Amino acid sequence: PEAKSGFSGAAPRSLGMKGLCHQQRPPISVAAVTAARTETECGTGVEVVSQQLGCVRELPDGAAMHRHVPKDHWCVTRADLADFERRVWFALQSGTIQPTAQDEFDPRDRCIGPTIYSVNEQFIKPVTKAAGMMSWALMLHPDGLKCDLFITHAWQEGIFEFIRKVLHSWPKGTRNAYCCMLSNPQNLDIASLICNPRSSPFALALLSASHMLVVPNRNESIYMRLWCAFEASLAYENNKVMQVASAPTARRSLWWACLGVCSAALCGALVGWLRHLAFFGPITTPEDRVCCAVIIITFTGTVFLDNSAARQTCHLCGAAANALYAMTADMLGPHHGSQSIATLHATIGVCGFILAEVDRVRNIAVRFEAGLLRKGYAGSIRRASCSVQSDADYILSDIGMRTGEVDRAIQILMRAGMWNCSLRAAAEVGVDVKDASHIEFAVPPIVSAIHLYVIMALFKPQDWLCHCFAIVDLALQLSWLISCVWLPKEKRAFGIKALKKISSAMLIDHMCIYIQRMVTSSTLNVFWATQAMAGEMDTVVLRLQGALYVGMAALALSVLVAGIDKVARWPVCGRALAQFLLTRDWCPRRSSSRLALGPDEAASTS
């Protein structure tokens, strides 16, 4: 245990940790080490670091630390990365990191920043050299942290861009990440560490991890680098979850999206009020049916359309129609329901279209990252390059006959934003997994609100069958929500996309029943006998509606729990059903052929 940690108890003399006056070495202050970097040239850097080590008389031996700590323990935490970003920014402002001829970055820019090459040469190497030649990870955690997340990137991205993507996309349940720029000892002989790729720190850390986070850059696909292709091969061989990292959506874009939909809703409300007040008098039943039809069409459009501009148009028109409906519902007379119910419907509808617009903006950002991953990609890792020919020969021979399989895994990663066994199985049966990992947040709250409204309506009549439907529907909804929280990301994304398609049928049913009630109320509300007939008809309609909603909730829960791979293998229509529930632009004749993207199509998509 002492040899593994390097600093616990009586540390070995090979580590140079003589004269400890405590049982455990105090942590190194990175701030002081950074300050010592400016004094290293005049010979005072070692003394400053030694003071930070308390009673340690000699700096730790970085080479010995890396010999004793396992290679899959050279890791940093999420908090370490956030702290590293702040320190790099401070180094930029103090002039420690300067632009070069190869990297002419703007020191005031905190969006992209200097490339990792520049940060490594001007910041990581001097600081870790002053601390004892170990890596940044072991400088912070001398005992090491076991790896459960592997980060693969090409060093061409800006440091702030890289860290923002990693922090935003950090997989749930992972704690310690292997990141080569911080995990490897940059001042030591790294070539000797990676001379055998299978026993290199990259390979051992990846074997220990459960997830691999793929970080694209703006210059070139990382899979034009052979080492990144080798890491993808290892992840594929060992069934690791691969996920594309993306930057958080700009708040300004989200605010503009919400403002646009809210403005459309205000315009719809204003038109409804002016129409009633100044122009045509009370709204008629046919006009109300048209308003309901517009709501149905716009919601269906946002579910099935893939074009971003068309979806935005549906969101604006849908919000306006909902607001218009709220303003005019009380003008139809008491048989059309109260104004409070109409306002509730409209509020739910407007909120749904606002969330759908936010999802649209987020989807643009996710597809942009996928386009960066495809940028310059030649279609196969055979065309990837490596600066050391011996490494290239070893890696290509190691991948060998799996090259085609790894190429398909990378294509799935680019298409879906993620790769795992579930998506692999779905793609093998011909399902187009486009955007399969993108989670949309608009549907669950809106569908839950609609179900809650129907459950309340089912409890109103003194009918035991309606009450049974209400209880079962409530139990299915709670089960769906709990399962959605705990299931893996790809199952959540597929379950929500399936719920979106199912909810479109629910909304159409909801609006048709509303129109039917308008017709029966306006034609039968003449004599007392016809009122009784209308009441009996309402009970029958509620029973049918309850049965339909229970069936849809059961289907949504089954699809969520099964996942895309099992749904695609259902007999008779499994693949077509999985394709229909997953994608917007569904076309069975093309779904099996769209997985392999060529360079031209990739460029047009990005």
Image: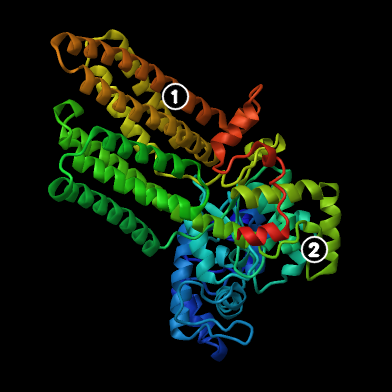
Q: Residue at x 16, y 37 (%)?
A: 331
Residue drawn 50% across the image and 45% down it: 305
Label 1: element kind: helix
Query: Label 1 is placed on what type of residue?
Result: Met
Local packing at callout 2 (Cα closer than 10 Å; few below 14, some 14-19, many 20+) is: few
The dot on residue 195 is 2
Q: Residues within 10 Å of mark 1 (few under 14, many from 20)?
A: some
Figure quadrant of the C terminus: bottom right
Q: Name the residue type under label 2.
A: Cys
> Can you identify the residue that label 1 sits on?
552
Give whichever of 277, 390 is nearer the camera.
277
- Give the percent coordinates (x, y) of residue 150: 61, 54
For residue 48, above or below residue 158:
below
Cα gap from disc 2 to disc 1, whole angstroms:
57 Å
Q: Position of residue 253 (x, y in %)?
A: 39, 62
Q: Nearer the viewer, residue 399 or 254?
A: 254
